[in-house]
Image: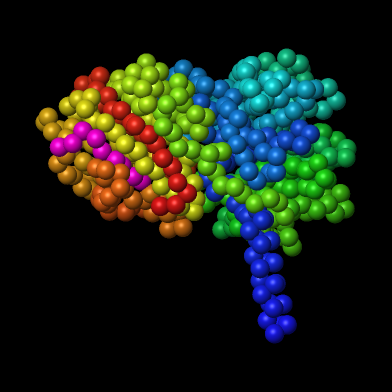
Amino acid sequence: MRSILTVVILFFSIFKTSAQSAHNPIIYADVPDLSMIRVDSVYYMSSTTMHMSPGLPIMRSTDLVNWQLLGYVYDTLADVDALNLKNGKNAYGQGSWASSLRYENNTFYATTFSGTTGKTYIYTTKDIEKGNWERHDFHPSLHDHSLFFDNGKAYMVYGSGKIRITELKPDLSGIQPGGLDQVIIENASLPAGGNVGLPAEGSQLFKIDGAYFLFNICWPKGGMRTVVIHKADKLTGPYTGRVALQDKGVAQGGLINTPQGNWWAYLFKDQGAVGRVPYLVPVQWKDGWPVLGVNGRVPDSLELPASKGYIPGLVASDEFNEKQLPLVWQWNHNPDNKSWSLTRRKGYLRLTTSHIATSPLDARNTLTQRTIGPECSAITSVDLSGMKEGDVAGLLLLQKNFGWAGIRMLEGKKYLVMETAVSGEQQRLPLSKNKLYLKASCDFRQDKGSFYYSFDGEKWSQLGDSFKLVYTLPHFMGYRFGLFNYATKTTGGYADFDFFHIEDHQ
């Protein structure tokens, strides 16, 4: 009897510990290219959202696990055709890439770079909680750079394979003429072997106890994403490198410590159609080097507080009752602000067509949120009475291989349609009503998406077949829920979305 009781107590003890612990991935959503800092007891993190607007999101946490959006560094990166979805151009997979987040002399710095504009961007604020970022930008675009302050000077470490350092002007408005500018590591991929497909990039530089540690990611051919660390006693080197982690493809990031003195590596993993998801890996120090993982492996459970979920911190439902959109929303490319409204009809998001498009991929004013794993769903209700001939509106799962469910106006009639980028129109049903409920669901354990419709919001019928969700490099982003309306013939039609409800289940 005593042995049975011991087993029961042990089981519930393990269950309780597991339930109260964090688990990898710490965020099961597309939050790639992490850069993280701690100021006193608060952690801040930036990430990449590329072609989305607003961009360069800033998140806040007090426990490294539960994160909340604070805001965005910029509303729009630039007023160019590619970012505006104009004249046949787009910025899918481009826009702004990996950022660097730093805190120095009571000032917060968020930097990024863009192949779309060919520039490097530096944003500063005294109050990261309120934002109000000031901007500097200059040519050229410094790839995967790490902003670094040392002995009163500012530098950027950047490059792919060959890693360089360059000194910045004191006001950060550009590269310092005649300042330090040299290669510090000729081949940063070398510790991972000579047969590398993706050269070392994603630089993040840290100074710890007087030593310099440079984190990079590389990808050996036939292998997996790999963390490489180089160490030096001087900023300019020489640097000695080693493979720091090679497990599950978890790589690219840097180091963070807690107020209690514990160290963690923040990294991310390609997780299929949901996107690139953040991981935390415990770090121990041995012989002056950070040692990542538990016996070289990425643990599933972590000695950190349990996750409270991502709703409403990173994604959220919306009744469209406020004068402004909540932070969880981002536009697919720069919006046309004259053609959307939260006030023209109280309690509704109105999307008005302003240009001719051929698919959701070139439709301006598509409003998006992240999907979340391992499964999720979103429901919306749309009023169709303002749509014009040729208009298309509905609920989207956005990626290059997109799928959508919604309404198509043809020859004066409304049709309920489900369509994918790969298979085209899968189902079309005549529609006589002006109000419709739509639902999209995602199962990221199988990377499968499905659509449903309803006329009362309670009884649902599947529309079309389930389809394969595929992460593609042209978009370089996990699937997003989207609300859209575009014209194929004449502009000025509108669709009114009553609400958006997101759940962490199908």
Secondary structure mainly formed by the magenta segment: strand
The residue depicted at 46 percent of the width and 44 percent of the height is 371
**Viewer-proximal residue, 22 or 466?**
22
- Residue 429 position, x and y percent, is 17, 44
Regarding residue 241, the answer to whether it shows in the image is no
**Viewer-proximal residue, 50 or 411?**
411
Bounds of the magenta segment: 432-440
User: What number of labels is visible?
Assistant: 0
Magenta segment includes 359: no
- Residue 117 position, x and y percent, is 52, 22
**Above or below for 292 versus 340:** below
**Above or below for 167 versus 290:** above
Quadrant of the rendering where the N terminus is positioned: bottom right
The residue depicted at 62 percent of the width and 54 percent of the height is 24
- Residue 141 position, x and y percent, is 59, 26
The residue depicted at 37 percent of the width and 26 percent of the height is 347
